[in-house]
Amino acid sequence: MFKFLKKNKTVELVSPITGKILPIEEVPDKVFSEKMMGDGVAIVPKDGKIVSPVDGTIATIFPTNHAIGLVTKEGLEVLIHIGLDTVELNGLGFKRRTENGSKVKKGDILMEFDPNLVMEHGKSPITLVIITNMDKVKHIEKNSGDIKKGDEFIFTCFL
């Protein structure tokens, strides 16, 4: 009723990994490039340490450790998807460092993986950071180029 009294909430995400940002539209997987799961960015990784991009709660860690879902106190839902088709590796080369339900801060280590092992098995190590509840996001800004783990790189404003 009194929507005009609500203030926009801004959430800034930091990069969960060091690498080069790739526009999500250029990811060689239609589910991601056509934003079927949401909007965000892809990162071609230079290492295999994944840290939390937000302060929040671990909502889910897939049994194969290739994807982690987080929720912020503002209600932003963030998915980190490590590699393309890496679910087929059944956890090979992935080591979780947190558990479902854990409270995390930006920069806390969540997962480690071996990008070389991923490539040796014919998979891409491209890591995606996706906002899955874009219906709640009024505006999103994304950086490009090289990024270091912990650098701010996605800025969102909620309605």
Image (spheres, rainbow, N blue to C red):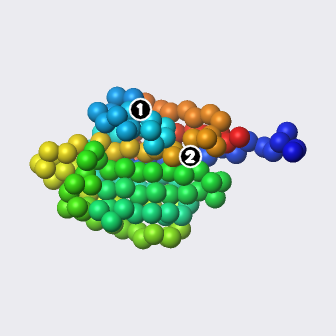
* Residue type highlighted by circle 2: Asn
* Among the two numbered marks 2 and 1 on one chain, the one whose residue lies closer to the N terminus: 1
Q: Position of residue 148 (x, y in %)?
A: 39, 43
Residue 143: x, y in percent?
A: 47, 32
In this rendering, is residue 40 above or below 48? above
Query: Whole-Å distance between the Cαs marked 2 and 1?
Result: 15 Å
Q: What's under tag 1, amino acid-wise?
A: Glu
Q: Which corner quadrant holds the N terminus?
A: top right
Residue drawn at x 78%, y 43% is 7
Q: Nearer the viewer, residue 80 or 110?
A: 80
Above or below, 60 relative to 136: below
**Where 95 sits versus 135, above or below?**
below
Placement of 158 over or under 75, stated as above or below: above
Q: Is residue 81 visible?
A: yes
- For the residue pair 76 and 105, the one nearer the viewer reads as 76
Query: Residue 141 at x, y = what percent?
Result: 55, 32
The residue shown at (71%, 40%) is: 159
Question: For residue 21, which quarter of the picture?
Answer: top left
Q: Is residue 136 left or right of residue 13?
A: right
| Label 1 CA crowd tier, 10 Å (few <14, some 14–19, many 20+) | some
> Which residue carries the number 1 mark?
34
